[in-house]
Amino acid sequence: MLRGRGFMSQKLPENIIPVGVVDWDRRLFDELIPLPEGTSYNSYLIEGSKKTVLIDTVDPSKVDEFLGNLRETGLKHIDYVVANHAEQDHSGSLPALIEEYPDIKVVASQKCKGILSDLLHLRDDDFKVVQDADTLSLGDRTLEFIEAPWVHWPETILTYVREEGVLFSCDLFGSHLAQDGLYVEDECRSADAAKRYYAEIMMPFRGLIKKHMQRLKDYEIKVIATSHGPIYDKPEFILNLYENWVSDDVEQHVLIPYVSMHGSIRESVEYFMERLAEEKVKATPFNLTVTDIGRLAEALVDASTVVFATPTVLFGPHPKVAYAAYLANILNPKTKYVSIINSYGWGGQCVEILGEFTKKLDAELIDPVEFKGKPDKRDFMKIDKLVENIISKHKTGE
Ligand code: FEO
């Protein structure tokens, strides 16, 4: 069995035992998000002097391995399972867990209880509902529950073990990264995975996460144990990264998601890139026919400017560009400026349609560049003007 996650060999403080599962092979989440490095579904068993509690479960695809891990602990009885979050990658094994441990109670927020009842058809009797700042004594340990709605569902709580300063944060601060060890092993790799995760899952809720992080300053946190990816035994590592990502600061960086069907857009993007390089403006192209969309999402976390470049297809943008614009729109990054480069054959509404798709971005539209067919000298001059406008906006930060 590909156990991973340092099962039973690496411990958190004082009898907190990791019983989750590493999913080395998963390559897609929500049938949407690429997982180039797999993921893990972390679950933790806390043995108090009087009560035993499990924190979260695992994706139902890994339920057998999860129950096997629990059996290996030798425990015949578990009093509670905390459902920090109702999404099935953490809750989906609850029915099987309840079958194995019939007396176990599911500790959840009222909202989480409602969602779990809808998703998993759990019974009222299965639950113990908790509110913000409620505590649960395990004898020598005290769990405190912290309501943290919208990270990234409305029902989420965080669980804090007062005596050890361990924060079980579920999705918040997580990363889709499969590795054998329990703790962060390679900070660069972990930072990259956590940024990609933040972009795809948390970024739309940046404002609320800022508030939650402010509140967490009242807690002495020694370890952050997420439900995906490596655990942070140096919490400031991930907290500092998040401080930066949720801040209003942007990097002067131009992202260019594009598709070229017959070379005209490619030629214009190459010219645009060259001109930006001459002006020492950082720029990254994303050829949407081959790009990992998660890399684009990650770059959106702190880039100031996005320029979509598309040929006209059936009167509108190429569908891959429309998809990238729609995705950027719902991820709600702090992008300040947007523009469009469009090559058309006989007409179309690319600019209008992409404008609609990016309405939620709250970014200023810099005059788009439109040209017919293959770009000529006059069209390259329009791109020069776009570069000039971008530099001017970057300078003034207007
Ligand atoms: Fe990892 Fe929102 O579930």
Image (cartoon, rainbow, N blue to C red):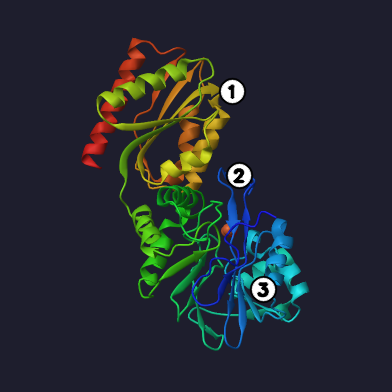
Secondary structure, mark 2, is: loop
Vertical comparison of 141 with 292: above or below: below
Q: Earlier in the sequence, mark 3 or mark 2?
A: 2
Categorize mark 3 by other alpha carbons within 10 Å: few (<14), some (14-19), many (20+).
few
Residue type, numbered disc 2 = Leu
**Which circle marks residue 73 in the picture?**
3
Q: Is residue 357 visible?
A: no
Residue at the spot 55% in from the left edge and 46% down from the top edge: 37
Secondary structure, mark 3, is: loop
Which of 343 and 68 lies nearest the eye of the viewer? 68
Q: Quadrant of ligand 1?
A: bottom right
Q: Quadrant of the N terminus?
A: bottom right
State the CA–CA distance, disc 3 to disc 1: 61 Å
Residue position for label 1 = 314
Query: Residue 235: image x %, image y %?
Result: 40, 64
Q: Earlier in the sequence, mark 3 or mark 1?
A: 3
Query: Residue 143: image x %, image y %?
Result: 52, 80
Q: Nearer the viewer, mark 1 or mark 2?
A: 2
Residue position for label 2 = 32
Q: Is residue 115 visible?
A: yes
Residue type, numbered disc 1 = Leu
Which of 240 and 145 lies nearest the eye of the viewer? 240
